[in-house]
Image (cartoon, rainbow, N blue to C red):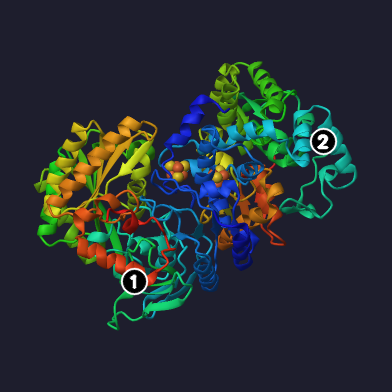
Amino acid sequence: MIRPEVIQKFVSIVGKDRCKTSPEDLLTHSYDASILEFVPDAILFPVSTEEVSRIMALASAENVFVTPRGSASGLGGECLAKKGGILLSFTQMNKILEINTENRYAIVEPGIVIADFQKAVEAVNLFYPPDPGSATVASIGGAVMMNAGGMRGIKYGVTRDYLLGMEIVLPSGEVMKTGTITAKDVTGYDLTRLICGSEGTLAIATKITVRLLPKPKARRTLLAIYDDIDDAGKTVAKIVEAGIIPATMELMDKTVIKAVEEAFHLGLPLDAAALLLIDVDGDDATIERQSPLIAEFCQGQGARNVRTSSSEEENVQLWAARRAAFGCIARLRPTCLIEDATVPVNQMVKAIKKVKEICERNNVQIAVLAHAGDGNLHPLMLCDQRDKEEMARVEKAMDEFVEYAMTIGGTLSGEHGIGVNKAKYLPQQLSATSLKIQRGIKNVFDPQGILNPGSFLEVSPK
Amino acid sequence: MIAKELQEEVYNCIKCGICMNACPVYKQLHVEGAAPRGKVQLIKKIQEGKFDISEGFKNLLYTCLLCETCTVNCPSGVKIDRLFKAMRAEVLKKYKLPLLKRIMSTVLSSDQLLPFCMFWGRTLGNPLMALLPKNGKIGAISFSKLPKFNGKPLMDQYPEIISPSGKAQGRVIYFPGCANNFLFENVGNSTIKVLQRLGVEVVFPKDLKCCSLPIFLSGARQMALSNIKSNLSAFSRYDNVDAIIVDCATCGAAFKEEYVHILGEMGEDTKEAQKVKNKVMDISQYLAKFDLKKYLQPLKGRVTYHDPCHLVRSQKIKDEPRALLKQIPGLDFAEMVGADVCCGGGGTFQLDHPDISVSITKNKIQSIRNTGADTVASGCPGCRLQINGNLGNEKIRVVHPIELLAEAMGKV
Ligand code: SF4
Ligand code: SF4
């Protein structure tokens, strides 16, 4: 609990309207898109760097916990007030400060929703590639802190690859700049890329500078239908091996197809075992060259049918459906937990088989979605949070799968982060030395440990 | 508590947040409590007994346009607006409706009061004056932008049976709705004229009541019940009609969607409501089967179309009204950006939250302006009031599509 007189001091920084303590506000800021819940003591909505700086200085002086929050679309409790204290919501600090077409960069405030930002830059013929499935919800600030990946990872990389610099506020309240607006920069440690992906444990970003690309002239979506999910997986491996790099390669299994079709009525075949949704983009010549080639690979690996989208409108529909897949799945069962382990692409077919086998053995209902081009699996475990016994089985299945992914050279999490749930696995991937160094870094930034307490570093076994 | 099957809905929300950035209100306020996700989660807590219905919760629940944008965007298929509507009825068990809405609901649900208020309002030259705060505005709309009352309610202008010109090709019941009955007579006149011209006999029952949607959506279900039953029995008096024609998006939504749900949730018999649901058609839907070309003379100018929530989302009617407009020779049709985004009116929302309402409407007006249209068509009196009320001095006409169609059909 924060003492009322301390709350009053916070109010004097942001004003009464932007400091919320009503039970309704606290409860609606207690969750993200996972099943975790932690109720904060107060929520502040800063709108300027100066306010954030004063908030942090006060929090340091009073030893109050502060947890930054974007849109709360994360999947591991990273933005929840795990030990109470202040939740710092950036939903109202959401402006685009500059889009520079000459030098192709943009400066934004952390609260802006990724899709809104993408739309704005595309209007001036530029392109911000990182495209997490939740782009219509998630904020750029959140994406930076989580180093969000997404559907275009195979060709364009992840959030970190587009970060040029930041203005950050340290837990002490000090304001600092990292990076530059130039494309190249080797001055000192690369703090920008260190803070990116730190799950909001090192500093708070108040301004974010990202690199932009020229907008691709055109894109085309291919839809390949399979009777055997293995063939879909093999197609991906073949395409990657051949050195063709589509913009996206998404895999959906039977269960996902059914759920998506039920929600969107796109005419997807309900009897298919799997489908690949592949986007190629670039100039017309590239598209003309690549798409028949890819179609050939699909057919060569046993695709029953390969369809090319006929219009941009159809592209948009197909991708909207893919984006909503996580939600669609929830039509089947109330709760849906997403695994996020990522494996080398050539191991993907095996990994999918394995996760299915594990779930079957533990009697857990499963659907498989994958950013297949990067081997980033998203097995969706369907369950009901209210059923304790079932949840125990789900947890066991997850444990087994994570362990398996480690043995074939995979990583704990491709893009969702460690958060609360996966912290227990951390020592399986990171050595004691690595963890020691990470804790040391945390200590340099946040000696008092007031920023995002209860995060992965603290929760993981020492 | 709310109906059992609705209670289960909250467990289908996986908190993905897709509904948030679709919600016009959240996009203005950027506070989770105002987001559909936030309200669904609060309802879950209330159901589980972990939180009580509170004044704060009530305010959040009513900081909502009931535009249903969240529902159509929710990938998980959560019936978000149904939950909210049912919850409003729960909230009213604990808190009373605010005075203004109480007066409005009483007026709409009674037989005598409305003519009385109308008479009074008309005499004073300012409609609805009796109900108004004296600050020059009613909600988001200034007095000067309010429409005048019809000289005579539409219902009193026609006989019960209106014969078509020429041989009868069909027979329909017409439901005018309060807005057209009392305010926008030209809409009703146009509908009747077009139907007559097409050889359709129009039955115009004299004992129709307010569809009551504004009443039950504010939560006062019990108050709405007698109107609902009375309308259903009025409709059931006439058999061998092809359809029940509605030219108000809201009344259509009430008959096609709300009646069945509300009666069901209140434990009432839904058989009649189900029958009516299958019979009711928006005028734009009904006209789709006619070849109108030969009746139409050219009009001038450019028109754009705004999708009322109660048509595009409640009734899934999107193409039919556009098709009507596009058929009119000489009239240039321009689609606006975000045509299906709520205008910000939300029925009584604009009374309770004029600031949020106006800021949403501003975007709509800008969208309209960008098309260069001189006319915006929309089949909902609420949208019409809201858009017209916020157009300022601009010379853009707001009409019902049927009015343009009737114009193109010329004088009968
Ligand atoms: S879109 Fe549906 S599932 Fe997602 S948060 Fe909103 S209500 Fe919940
Ligand atoms: S009905 Fe409309 S205003 Fe209400 S929560 Fe849903 S999207 Fe928002």
At mark 2, the secondary structure is: loop
Tally the numbered discs.
Answer: 2
Across and down, in percent, residue B212 comes to 68, 31
Vertical relation: B71 (above or below) B93: below
Across and down, in percent, residue B298 comes to 59, 50
Q: CA distance from mark 1 to mark 2?
A: 67 Å
Task: Judge the density around disc 1: few (<14), some (14-19), many (≥20) Cα neighbours within 10 Å.
Answer: many
Ligand 1 has an atom within 8 Å of the beta carbon of the residue at disc 1 = no
Vertical relation: B81 (above or below) A297: above
Residue placed most toward the observer, A56 or B33: A56
The image quarter in which residue A328 lies? top left
> Which labelled disc corresponds to residue A163?
1
Residue placed most toward the observer, A290 or B97: B97
Across and down, in percent, residue B88 comes to 63, 35
Vertical relation: A364 (above or below) A220: above
The image quarter in which residue B220 lies? top right
Q: Is residue A437 left or right of residue B235?
A: left
Task: Judge the density around disc 2: few (<14), some (14-19), many (≥20) Cα neighbours within 10 Å.
Answer: some
Residue placed most toward the observer, B321 or A221: A221
The residue singled out by tag 2 in the image is B152
* Kind of residue indicated by mark 2: Lys
Q: Residue at x 70, y 47 (%)?
A: B352
Q: Residue at x 32, y 52 (%)?
A: A315
* Kind of residue indicated by mark 1: Leu
Label 2: chain letter: B
Q: Is residue A169 left or right of residue B350?
A: left
Label 1: chain letter: A
> Which labelled disc corresponds to residue B163?
none
The image quarter in which residue A113 lies? bottom left
Residue B401 visible from this viewpoint: yes
Viewport quadrant of the C terminus of chain A: bottom left
Across and down, in percent, residue B299 comes to 61, 51
